[in-house]
Amino acid sequence: MKPRKTTCLAHRWIGLIISLQLLAWSVGGFVFSVLDIDEVHGDHEVRVRHNSEISIDSLPQVMRGSLRDQGVKYIGTATLIHRGLGAFWEIRNTDGGWIGRANFSGELAGHISQDQAQQLTKDDFLPEAPVRSIQLIKENPPSEYRGGRLPLHG
């Protein structure tokens, strides 16, 4: 075989392989943009496993007292989370509605303050980026939020 013919043949095969890879990436990107992101992440499985009533008797005693004072008998989830303000329990009812957050001693706290939200923003983004506004979103979140749980501090 002549060197020129070999080069052309190799060029065609390499082009075909690269084209197939680009096609696979494009189809995959399209499919994942069409699918519900919760389905892709498997979040629907997590919600099913944790969407049951939990008696507050299974929580620490101080937390039980605080919840009972608010008239809460059952909760849906108590999730231990850390978002930059230290670890705390995020407590939601069986419908996913927000009841409150509690520290490790079980004392209920309200929403994070504006100062705390501003500090979290400064920690998460470049220090040069100014915070234009802080608001608590309890309903009608922006479309980018994609059905996440409320309330949201934006």
Image (tube, rainbow, N blue to C red):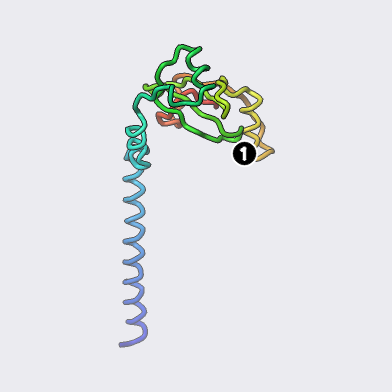
- Seen from the viewer's position, the closer of residues 99 and 146 is 99
Q: Is residue 79 above or below residue 9?
A: above
Rendered-image quadrant of the N terminus = bottom left
Q: Is residue 36 left or right of residue 99?
A: left
Q: Position of residue 92 (x, y in %)?
A: 44, 24
Q: Position of residue 143 (x, y in %)?
A: 43, 29
The residue that appears at 57% across and 22% down in the rendered structure is 107
Q: Residue furthest right?
A: 128
Which residue is labeled 1 in the image? 125
The residue that appears at 47% across and 20% down in the rendered structure is 99
Q: Is residue 149 left or right of residue 48?
A: right
Q: Is residue 95 left or right of residue 133?
A: left
Rendered-image quadrant of the C terminus = top right
Q: Is residue 128 above or below residue 2?
A: above
Mark 1 crowd level (few <14, some 14–19, many ≥20, 10 Å Cα): few
The residue that appears at 36% across and 58% down in the rendered structure is 22
Q: Amino acid at mark 1?
A: Phe
Residue 86, quarter of the rendered image: top right
| Callout 1: SS | loop
- Seen from the viewer's position, the closer of residues 7 and 56 is 56
Residue 41, quarter of the rendered image: top left
